[in-house]
Image (cartoon, coloured by chain):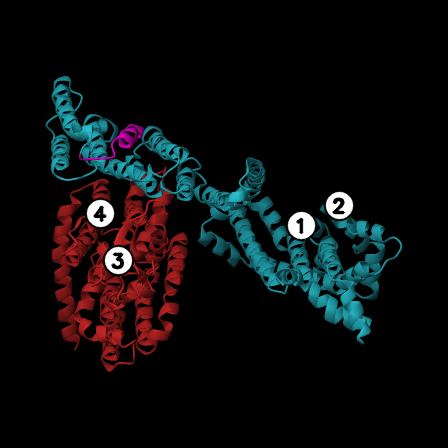
Chain colours: A cyan, B red
Amino acid sequence: MILPTIWARGMKNNASSPFRFFPFLIVFLHLVLLVVSSKRGWMPPFEFFSILLFVSNCVCAVITINRKVNVTMLSAIMLIIAGHAVIGHRIAPDSLTSGAILMVNILIVYVGFNIYTFLSGAHFAVFAASYLVLFYIFIIQMENAEALFILSLMGLAATARKFSLISYFWALVASFTVFQPYPWQSLAILFLIITVILSVPEEDRSPVFFIFLVCGLALLFFVLFPVFVLVFNEDVRSLINVLKVHDVKMALMRTMVTATLSTIILGVFGIPFSYVLSRVKFKGKTLIMSLMDIPIIIPQSAAGIALLRVFGHNQVVGEFFLRVFGIQFDATMLGILLAQVFVAMPFMIKSAYTAFCGVPPDLERCACTLGATRLSAFRRIALPIAARGICIGAVLAWARAAGEFGAVLFIAPYPQTAPVVVYNRFLSLGIVQTAPLVAALIIFSASLFFLLQISARLLPDIHSREDKA
Amino acid sequence: MSRWLDIIENFLASLFSNIKLVEKGLLGLEGSYVELLTILALGLLAVIPVMVPESNRQRWRHVNQIFGIAIFIFVVFTCLGVFGMIRNFYRGLHEIGRENIIALYYCSVPVTILVTSLLFGPAFCGWICPTGALQEFSGFITRKWTVPWKKAGYPFSWVVLTMALFAAAVFLLWMYRLSMTRLFFIEDSSIYWSEVLIILLFILVFRMKQWDARLRRLRYLSFLIIVFGAIMSLRITSPVHFGFAKVYDPASFLSTVMVVLAAFTIPMVWCRYLCPWRCVIAWAAKHSVRSIHFDSSKCITCGKCGEVCDLDAVKNGIIDTNECHMCYKCVDTCPAKCFSIKDNWKK
């Protein structure tokens, strides 16, 4: 590939070029090869394909006399034809495949001649190296892959001229050869990474940023890969079938209902509280703020046992509720609700607090001077402005509540929520039977989460509007 | 009535049984030869647009299209058509590393088309695609009515409505006939596409001007459905089977006929509004090396380029790459020679 390029640099003018008769030299070389190899038995000399190659070389040479064609490119093509005559049949299983590879090689030469004029040296080196690596992968490494070699060379020819295209091409090839057991997963992740790296604007392209970015993306890869493996490896039908199982369906419904209810409870109690936290100064505020983190700090199982210790039906508080109101917490929906509220609380309150802190207090004071009460200032000024932050917090709290496993398992192992169903299924049926359920759960919760996130982002964002103005 | 339908059906069946004899001869090519030949043939057909003389380019194009139909019928009869190509591409990618020959078998046509589109522009659509060729040839017959209709800015016209009604009548009659002997499954979903086509015809007869651009987005929906079907491993039969599949498939044959009949009314109606593969080709066309350049300084604003374009892709010389089929009709008809074909490798 590089040799004809060097010639091309020296051979701009076709008419007066000293290399004008080079094609005839190649034809002569081809003839010598034919004669010698027929004596030595390197290649079958008088086979149809071999004769065809020789004739086409002669035709190419004749073309160079009459017309003003690019002699350099044509001689490169002729060299390739002669080369195929000698070694083509050793690499390819039959002459038709060899012919197809020859055609694609000619395409590669055509592309190479067209792009070398403006491509940087490094990019052209990538192009040339790609050819060799593809040859290594498909011809040497894999068996019976000559046909795929043809396809991949065509892909290379089409994508070589652009760095972005060739990176996507390599992502495709690598994920279907090197990462073969998990092609779609690695394809998705590689496409993501390439898109991110290529879209970095010119002025930010420093090696430091690049290394930092790659470090972060490697971490992301580590997180995404298991998830993607689980999701993409499942047949869509098995996903649908598992969703039709009664237990699973009920568990999903129950999870959605309880998570929504606990988010509403958190909203009713938490939003006013975080408003007060953000507006009023009082003693022990820092302490309260840090106590808020307790559900995050302590292990979930510990939280579950702590709840059970208090609200279990034979404990003091639990017995009181059972005796006076007839309410039992353990092994009921109320217990699930309790555990979910417990673990999701910090998410709701922290984000509501941050959202309220972003609302300038002057606005409310101004409203008060204009005759609004404290309550209507909260309701009509602070709440709408902070709505977006609160909603995103609510979505996070919802996701946390829906995904809660440890605390729920201890206080209410039955009725089952979705994570508990996964656990029980894993214990009784094993990992293979659980995988479709988990994939369905991931898809379900991820899509719901994204939907909620998007709808939360539809709310007006006061800060971005100020920036635009 | 029923007797006549029987006669027509028998006639059609006999027509295709003859063609299958030719098919058998080509089945002698075993292994992956068929696919290799396909790659070579498609590659060659994609290079031809550059090599043919400019003076008779449109005639050469029609010859090329006929070759395209021949190749798609005889050589790639197993994986032809727009639905099949997407599904087979997906399946073929799955087989890489396991069954390489099968991977080639499924991937050869889509990869060749994508690669040639990335290099030589979407010439596949205008020069090779058998569906496009069928529509174009059938569009010739009614050109007398459709061209003035287009020139007038798509007003309501009784002639066009009659053509649409004719297509709908054929569809309903045929469906009535098929449904007497046959149950329909998801495999026959190409019928849904032809139903949509008929509904589209009626919308377009009345509201072509207003809804044209919006309805073209249906292609993306069509593409998404097919991709989802491929992932679900649903066997959706292509509407462009021409009825020459290994098994005579009346449903997909009906849809082929519907595509042809609908193209009587609105030229290239399938490509405009429903072709799922066009989404992919449009992406490739955006990045393609070859494109048609317009020199506005030469333009005499005669508007002929817009008139000849079957796809309404040209407006005052500006070509919409999303729609263009690279048929070079505008290039050949332009009296002021405003258009030129350029290879821009830096793009």
Disc 2 and disc 3 in contact, CB within 8 angstroms = no
In the current view of this chain or complex, which residue is farthest to the right?
A283
> Is B198 in the magenta?
no
Residue B307 sits above or below residue B105 on the image: below
Quadrant of the drawing holding the N terminus of chain B? bottom left
Q: CA distance from mark 4 to mark 2?
A: 67 Å
Q: Label 2: chain?
A: A
Circle number at residue B339: 3
**Is B327 or A450 nearer to us in this picture?**
B327
Residue highlighted by disc 2:
A297
The residue carrying pointer 4 sits among few (fewer than 14), some (14 to 19) or many (20 or more) residues within 10 Å by Cα, namely: some
Q: CA distance from mark 1 to mark 2?
A: 16 Å
Q: Element type at marker 3? A: strand
Circle number at residue B47: 4
Residue highlighted by disc 1:
A405
**Is B287 or A121 nearer to us in this picture?**
A121
Residue A434 in the image: state x and y as whole percent.
54, 47
